[in-house]
Amino acid sequence: MKKITIIAACMLINLLAAQAQQITIGTFNLRYDNPGDTGNLWKDRAPIAAALIRFHGFDIVGTQEGLRNQLNDLQKDLPEYGFYGIGRDDGRSKGEHSAIFYKKEKYDLQQSGDFWLSETPEKPGFGWDARINRICSWVQLRDRKTTKSFYVFNVHYDHRGVQARVESSKLLVRKIEEIARGGAVILTGDFNGNHQSEWYRFIQNGTLLKDVLWQVDHPYRNNGSFNSFKTGNPSEDIIDHIFLSKHFTATRYGVLTDTYHG
């Protein structure tokens, strides 16, 4: 895979202990369906991506870069999952999505929405020094067993714009506060930046969300989360992240290095 998957397990702790349920979360950049990816075409990767999601038992997966045909392929192979997301180019189906997959047997979809990472977040576009359209999609899920609800936000920051990433973090925090209104929040995404980045420090040093990595005793991270299909030369940078609000306690964290064809 182009991007290695980040996995986290957490529990919603504002419930009674007898009601608390573990949630296994992943963030997964699918790599868009590019016919030029010789040797790594989506048609070959699709069943492996679906098998990875099922094997690791993700309850919720935030995906990035998926085109509509890729999301449909995953849902066909994973009928136990529902998903929400819209295309970043037209607000419907065109362009890459920041789609969120969730287990239908565990969660009901209560609300959903999207905003663009720009000065005009209500319509398709990009802002600041970004190069292309960037979108954040979100869902409110209701746990069928406990009846408790929480929010999941999933995002893909710009790969070029340094200012855009910082401003995106500011916008993201404002939007989460506006939408969730103090409720439990999970944030997943490909942020195109590591732990030393200004955009990262803005979120991590705030009061709303904290990176799962620093909340567990024994995180599993032998390498970074970006490999560009070059498994023999892994990066050390983690640019994909999962953040949690104070309502959750994290129990596991890992950077998964699953590959295919060696």
Image: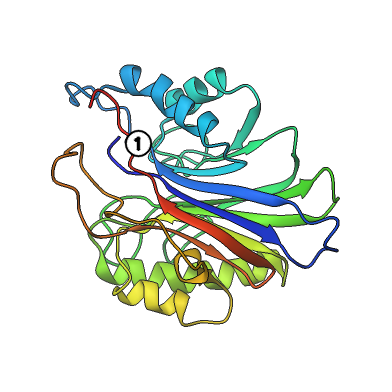
> Is 92 drawn above or below residue 202 in the view shown?
above
* Residue drawn 31% across the image and 51% down it: 225
The amino acid sitting under disc 1 is Asp
Farthest residue to the front: give it.
218
Q: How many badges with numbers are in the image?
A: 1
Where does the image place residue 258, in percent across and percent down from the top left?
35, 36
* Dot 1 alpha-carbon crowd within 10 angstroms: few under 14, some 14 to 19, many 20 or more: some
Relative horizontal placement of residue 254, taking residue 184 as reference (left or right): left
Q: Residue furthest left?
A: 233
Residue topped by disc 1: 258
Return the residue nearer the eye: 111 or 238: 238
Q: Quadrant of the C terminus?
A: top left
> Image check: 140 left or right of 101?
right
How was this image coloured?
rainbow
Which residue is located at x 44 percent, y 23 percent?
Answer: 69
Task: Kindly state the secondary structure of the residue where label 1 is placed.
Answer: loop
